Structure formats: structure tokens, C-alpha cells
Amino acid sequence: MRMDIYRRAEHDGVFSYLAVPEGKPIPAEAINTDWQRETSALEVDEQAAGLPTYHIDQPLEQIRSKGYAITALKDMG
């Protein structure tokens, strides 16, 4: 699956990341004017347990359940 990745500054140089299927808009419940495109059309293996670069756990499972995947809160330190 190909995904578009967005990032948002949090604090002290820390970013949170949001992934959506390529070409899809950010779902309304996650929309925020602070999201900036990080990368487009990132190829993600269907078996991937996570996207460590973006601190996103279970990206495909998250997308299936809510339409997007987002950085885990535990990684926002």
C-alpha cells in the first residue's frame, strides 16, 4: 500500500506523524491546519508492523479501523 505522510510540530523539536492512503484526504476527525506534507506515495509493506521512522505502530490496522494512522502517544516524549 502507498501512503502519504504528514507531520506536525509538537514541542521541543518533536513531531507527530499521520499516514493516510495515497491521494486520500485527512479524515475530518484528524484534520488540523498544522499538518504539513512530509512525503508522498511511501510504499509500505502489507505485513509491516510499524513505520519506525514516523513512530507509527500497526499502520495498516489503524488505517482499516479509522482511515488514518498516527504516531503513538508513548513515542511523543
Image (tube, rainbow, N blue to C red):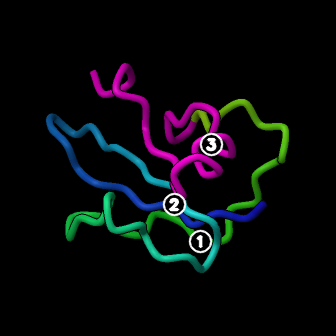
The Cα atoms of the two marked residues, 2 and 1, are separated by 6 Å
Residue 65, placed above or below residue 11? below
Which quadrant holds residue 58? top right
Q: Is label 3 in a helix, a strand or a loop?
A: helix
Q: Is label 2 in a helix, a strand or a loop?
A: strand
Residue 19, placed above or below residue 16? below
Name which residue type carries label 2.
Ile
- Nearest to N terminus: mark 2 or mark 3: 2
Q: Position of residue 5 (x, y in %)?
A: 51, 60
Circle on res. 5: 2
Q: What residue is pinned by disc 1? A: 40
Residue numbers of the magenta segment: 53-77
Q: Position of residue 21 (x, y in %)?
A: 63, 66
- Nearest to N terminus: mark 1 or mark 3: 1
How would you rate the neighbour count of disc 2 (Cα within 10 Å): few for under 14, some for 14-19, many for 20 or more? many
Q: Is label 1 in a helix, a strand or a loop?
A: strand
Q: Which of label 1 and label 3 is nearer to you?
A: 3
